[in-house]
Image (cartoon, grey):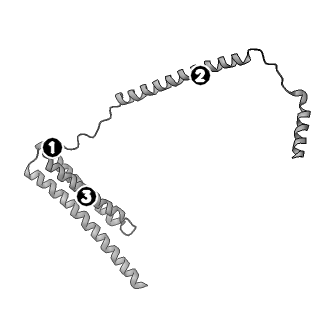
Amino acid sequence: MKKENKKLDHLFEKFENQWDIEIIKNNHEERFVKKLKSKKSNWKRFVAIGIAASIIVLLSLSIFNHTPKKTEELQFASKETKQTDSIFTVLIERELDKINEKKSPENKKIIADALKQMKVLDADYEKIMQELKTNGESKQIIYAMISNLQTRISFLQSVLQHIENKEQKINIADEKTM
């Protein structure tokens, strides 16, 4: 500790005549407080202007941003038809998720073929929906819609069953070789 004090004393002695010493004027504290207060008022203005500019930007974005919303999904005449479509759509999505979970190098080709077939069934469904838009609900169109949805679900279930059977056969073969 004494060595450190000696080093500091030596340092102060070395630079003793080089210190920048200035005598403070009489009203120094008053001038300092005055400058400090004047800077605060500028800061308050800057904050207020920044907040106002942010509000203007947000308002202009919300007013001038006219992105088309997906309000026009399908205009079904009856709630039952819309409900049927949404239920089947959820079921189809669940089956697709199950199939995608089963992705593996062994199942790659089966899943790719299944997705191609699903695109064909989706295109047929889109044609039925276009027909529904133009001609309105009729028994034939609703039957075609439900039939397409059922076909897609059945198809996905059979693909999933096929994948599971294939995995089971592989597991059984692996057990026999051990």
Alpha-carbon span between mark 2 and mark 1: 65 Å
Mark 2 or mark 1, earlier in chain: 2
Q: Which element is circle 2 on?
A: helix
Q: Residue at 28% across / 71% down in the picture?
A: 162
Report which residue position mark 2 lands on: 40
Report which residue position mark 3 lands on: 92
Q: Where does residue 6 sit, x and y in percent of width and height?
A: 91, 41
Q: What residue type is labelled 3?
A: Ile
Q: Where does residue 75 sit, x and y in percent of width and height?
A: 17, 42
Q: Which amino acid does label 1 sit on?
A: Lys
Q: Looking at the image, is 140 positioned above or below residue 157?
A: above
Mark 3 or mark 1, earlier in chain: 3
73 or 130: nearer the viewer: 73
Q: Which of marks 3 and 2 is in front?
A: 2
- Asked if marks 3 and 2 touch (Cβ < 8 Å), the reply is no
Which quadrant of the structure image shows residue 77? top left
Q: Where does residue 70 sit, x and y in percent of width and height?
A: 27, 40
Q: Where does residue 177 sit, x and y in percent of width and height?
A: 42, 84
Q: Which residue lies furthest to the top in this view?
A: 26
Q: Which element is circle 1 on?
A: helix
Mark 3 or mark 2, earlier in chain: 2
Which quadrant of the structure image shows residue 144? bottom left
Q: Looking at the image, is 170 positioned above or below residue 149?
A: below
- Asked if marks 2 and 1 touch (Cβ < 8 Å), the reply is no
Q: How crowded is mark 3: few (under 14 residues within 10 Å), some or many (20 or more)?
A: many
Q: Which element is circle 3 on?
A: helix
